[in-house]
Amino acid sequence: MDFRRLIAAAAAVCALASSAAAGKVEVGKPAPDFHAFTLDGKRLTLADFKGQVLILNFWATWCGPCRKELPLLDAYERIQGKYGLAIVAVTTEDSAPTDRLRPVAKMLSLPVARHFFGPYGDPTQVPTNYVIDRAGIVRYAKAGAFDLDALNDLLVPLLQEPAPPDAAAAPAAPTATATP
């Protein structure tokens, strides 16, 4: 192997190692990228939500707490979306078939993704939520359903934070807690 190929191979190994390390989800660290496909075929990535507060909610149709949490998240996003909140509901692969998920998705204002690629979530623990702030930092990562008080306690302060200067203009911050 010549010197240039050896250097190229070493660089490839380093790149793979750094991308694997960058792919771990840790609270307080930058959010790893992902891509997901909604039921209507739209591709979503982390960059699509730059300057917004994002919740990635992993749920399943067979999960009782998920069936309570999903309508709450939908209502919450309808209220707080104007302040820069976005939510993506990611259904697990072992949930209902796509043709049975479409009617559920049509009742929601938030996007429902079926195919998700990235280091988030453990489909055996649903619901699981990840909250990413306007600057792209993971601020919350936990299995378990949100209730309204927990949403307000966590999200209202994040929505009041200004968007980073390099982010697109974010909506004005909320002045009161939401009550869906």
Image (cartoon, rainbow, N blue to C red):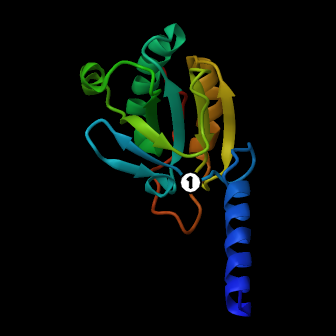
Residue 43 drawn at (x, y percent): 36, 50
Determine the image quadrant of residue 89. Answer: top left
Identify the residue shown where x is 56% and y is 21%.
Answer: 127
Identity, as a three-letter code, of the amino acid under mark 1: Asp
| Quadrant of the frame with the C terminus | top left
Residue 91 drawn at (x, y percent): 44, 27
Does residue 180 show up? no
Left-right relation of 107 to 117: left
Residue 163 drawn at (x, y percent): 56, 57
Q: Who is closer to the viewer here, 166 or 12?
A: 12
- How crowded pointer 1 is (Cα within 10 Å; few <14, some 14-19, many 20+) is rated as some
Q: Is residue 123 above or below residue 172?
A: above
Residue 122 drawn at (x, y percent): 61, 29
| Quadrant of the frame with the N terminus | bottom right
Identify the residue shown where x is 71% and y is 69%.
Answer: 13
Left-right relation of 165 to 88: right
Identify the residue under disc 1.
33
Identify the residue shown where x is 67% and y is 64%.
Answer: 16
Q: Who is closer to the viewer here, 83 or 29?
A: 29
| SS category of the residue bearing label 1 | loop
Looking at this view, name the residue that lies furthest to the bottom.
3
Identify the residue shown where x is 24% and y is 23%.
Answer: 99
Does residue 95 show up? yes
